[in-house]
Amino acid sequence: MKSLTRLHVVCALGAVAVVTAAAAWAQTSAVDEIAKYRAALKDGNPAELWEVRGQGMWAQPRGPKQVSFEKCDLGLGPGVVKGAYAQMPRYFADADRVLDLESRLLWCMVAQQGYTDADARKSPFGAGNERKSDMEALVAYVTSESRGIKMNVALNHPKEQEAYRLGGKMFAFRGGTHDFSCLTCHGDDGKRIRLQDLPNLTTVAGAQLAYTTWPAYRVSQGELRSFQWRLFDCFRQQRFPELLYGSDASIALTMYLARNANGAAFDAPAIKR
Amino acid sequence: MADPMRIRANLVGDVTDVKVLMSHQMETGQRKDAQGKVIPAWFIQNVAVTHSGKTVLSAQWGTAISQNPFLAFRFKGAGKGDKVQVTWTDNRGDKRTDEATVA
């Protein structure tokens, strides 16, 4: 009788092992299929349409003062775009703040082109037929000019160090109705939302892969999405208060994630499902 | 006015490899807006590609084609420096023509 029970236990354990192996296989094959899908789409990435539109806008006189972005200094001198994104966010003495790309563009629109702050931040994110976002096009163009260049975000100025420290703190801060933090989803390997793999941002490889593939064209939304949008939507998914566009909080988080990606070649605008 | 297309044409041996990205909403006519009203269909109907006055591809499209469509095809007979011209027409009668040089 005793030996019979033991046999049953052994059989049951065997069955469990088979089930787990099958589940693991199904999961990796789904991941492989998504990777194949991305590779197939990479050749015809519609992000290029945003890049072309942004490039055209860059040189155009804009705003009440009719000044183009060629006067806008992204950190490497007025109008220099090549490689600028790989070194952002950074401290700008004229603004006396640490700024990421999008908040820097806002700054140029207000200080140089004469827009009011409200006008400058009118349509940060596009919405299909109803609204096209100039900001997303500009972001696509500027970031495309850093493709292949190694991420090199400095922490020299005390305000840069402060932003990095705050960003790290926010990344681990739990709150909201669901008691979430960024780490809840991005602190372990192998986490998913539905079929979407979530990068483990606490590892160097995970942080590099994630940061260097944003902005991206989202096939399911038919839009190019910027890094500010990525953070905005993470906050929404966490049921946090709305992350204000270009706010110090958004810049600090960007600083933390960008700096952690240092050393990897930037590879965006990318394409995501 | 629609946004410009992105066209690449590369000669590989005697075959020209053409890749075209078009900017278009490609609305199917089956979706509804926030008020519950049907969003009218709006899509590219005809695509024509010519090389030195000769049509090398002509296509009739419908609502099954994705937003911001990507079209890739190959044809023979072009040389380096030739122009390839792509035109689309949508169901509202909007039109857009762009061209690329074979490289």
Image (cartoon, grey):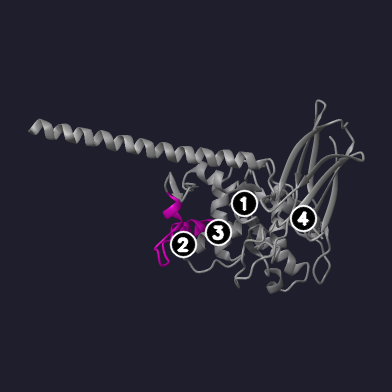
Tell me if label 2 and label 4 are in contact, CB under 8 Å: no
Horizontal relation, residue B98 to residue A141: left or right: right
Q: Residue flagged by tag 2: what amino acid is it?
A: Gln
Residue A76 visible in this rendered orientation of the protein = no
For the point 61% across and 56% down, the residue is A221
Q: Secondary structure at mark 2?
A: loop
Which residue matches tag 1?
A: A219
Q: Position of residue A111 (x, y in %)?
A: 74, 68
Residue A113 position (above or below residue A211): below
Output the chain of dot 4: A
Label 3 vs label 2: CA separation? Answer: 11 Å
Q: Is residue B91 left or right of residue A225?
A: right
Mark toward the viewer: 3 or 4: 4
Direction from residue A143 to residue A200 in the image, left or right: left
Residue at label 2? Answer: A238
Mark 3 surroundings within 10 Å by alpha-carbon count, few (fewer than 14), some (14 through 19), many (20 or more): some
- Say which amino acid is labelled 4: Arg
Question: Who comes first in sequence, dot 3 or dot 4?
Answer: 4
Looking at the rendering, the stretch of residues picked out in magenta corresponds to A163-187
Q: Position of residue A41 (x, y in %)?
A: 64, 42
Q: Please tell me the numbered disc located at residue A53.
A: 4
Badge 2: residue crowd in 10 Å (few <14, some 14–19, many ≥20): some
Question: Does residue A241 lie above or below A20 as drawn?
Answer: below
Looking at marks 2 and 4 on the same chain, the residue that comes earlier in the sequence is marked by 4
Which is nearer the N-term, disc 1 or disc 2? Answer: 1
The crowd level at tag 4 (other Cα within 10 Å; few <14, some 14-19, many 20+) is: some
Q: Nearer the viewer, residue A248 or A128?
A: A128
Sequence-first tag of 3 and 2 = 3
The residue that disc 3 covers is A231
> Residue A142 got which mark?
none
4 or 1: mark nearer the eye:
1
Amino acid type, callout 3: Leu
